[in-house]
Amino acid sequence: MTRIRETEWKRRYVFVGVLSSSRYAYVEAFSDQDQESRLTAHVNMFRYFGGVPRILVPDNLKTGITRADRYDPVINRVYRELAEHYGTAVIPARVRKPRDKPNAEGTVGIVTTWILAALRDRVFFSIRELNEGIAEKLERFNAKPFQKKEGSRLDAFLAEEKAALLPLPEIPYELSSWKKAIADKSYHVSVEKMLYSVPYEYIGHEMEIRLTRNVVEIFFDGQRVCSHTRLRGRPGQCSTVPSHMPPEHRKYSLWDGSRFVSWAEDVGPHTAVVMRGILSAHAVEQQSYRSCYGLVRLGDTCSFERLEAACEKALLYTPRPGYRNVKTILTTGQDRVKTSPAVPETARQDKDSESYGLVRGAEYHGGKK
């Protein structure tokens, strides 16, 4: 890539791709040189050529090459995926060896003169406007006659190379990124503050997640386990596939707020109050369903009598107890401890005074009875 001034204050970077025989070129400007820009440039270049060259000879940028080596270079994982999607091979140029891609090196200099220099007096207010100006000059550049032989880059491309290109796949490559996450006890992985389910057998295992614009794919040990539609918007959303749940959870997968409340009313009035409080704790009711599931499971593991007693005890501590409050009471056995009857404040003060001897009569101070 080479730099170009879009305005007096900002710089943009230009991707240049050239076919080896015809020297037919593709040029596009980007805001930076990150991996997304580089891969987008390749996808757009293949579309412009109407096919895919059998070999790609890129520079050794970190966005494409993880480790530069004369004999065994390591290709970036995402860049390798792009090459596999289009059926082409990546053979990076050797470091500091411009002879490995002479046409590209020479075309960069010509592009600087014929395209970038021609646009130097124009002001562009967006990257889209800049690329529209480049595209106009690029068409003229490729159609410009050669100086030492007949025809142009476009003529040579149509006559010599277009038929030799690999066909484009039906679906263009979709940019992706990879992350790692451990499946928690709720058989979900957290990715960018969103939750996606995995089969419960993978609880506690580290999963690899491939993110595209619309899809989340989850892998374990190189094998794809499942996929989800990518969630957007408010953090904390959850995508759960019922088949990923343990058998004891599946029977609750189709429950809604009214069914949770109906179940709680069967347990007792205090449980119903707690359940309604959990459901109203979030702006979106579905966000509270996991806590509701937890309360139902407490009823499965303990008796309904203990759960009702724990909810009653929790309501003494706070007007809006949650799942954790009730679980703590059951775990510590506080639901079995009876609450002492309330003692009037005046009686309590009199009892304290007698117990500790804080009130002494007149005789103690030498006074009269």
Image (cartoon, rainbow, N blue to C red):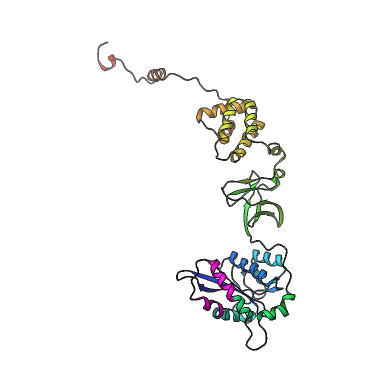
Residue 33 lies in magenta, yes or no? no
Q: Is residue 28 above or below residue 344?
A: below
Along the line of sight, the residue nearer the viewer: 236 or 213? 213
Residue 82 location (% of width, % of height): 67, 65
Q: Residue furthest top?
A: 369
Q: Is residue 20 visible?
A: no
Along the line of sight, the residue nearer the viewer: 359 or 173? 173
Quadrant where the C terminus lies? top left
Q: Quadrant of residue 58?
A: bottom right
Residue 91 location (% of width, % of height): 67, 74
Q: Give the overall secondary structure of the magenta segment.
A: helix
Residue 100 location (% of width, % of height): 64, 80
Q: Is residue 292 above or below residue 141?
A: above
Q: Is residue 228 above or below residue 338?
A: below
Q: Residue at x 43, y 18 (%)?
A: 344
Q: Quadrant of residue 364?
A: top left
Q: Residue furthest bottom?
A: 148
Residue 119 lies in magenta, yes or no? yes
With 115 as the anchor, is 296 left or right in this view? right
Q: Is residue 220 above or below residue 89?
A: above
Q: Which residues are magenta?
A: 114-137
Q: Residue at x 64, y 89 (%)?
A: 148
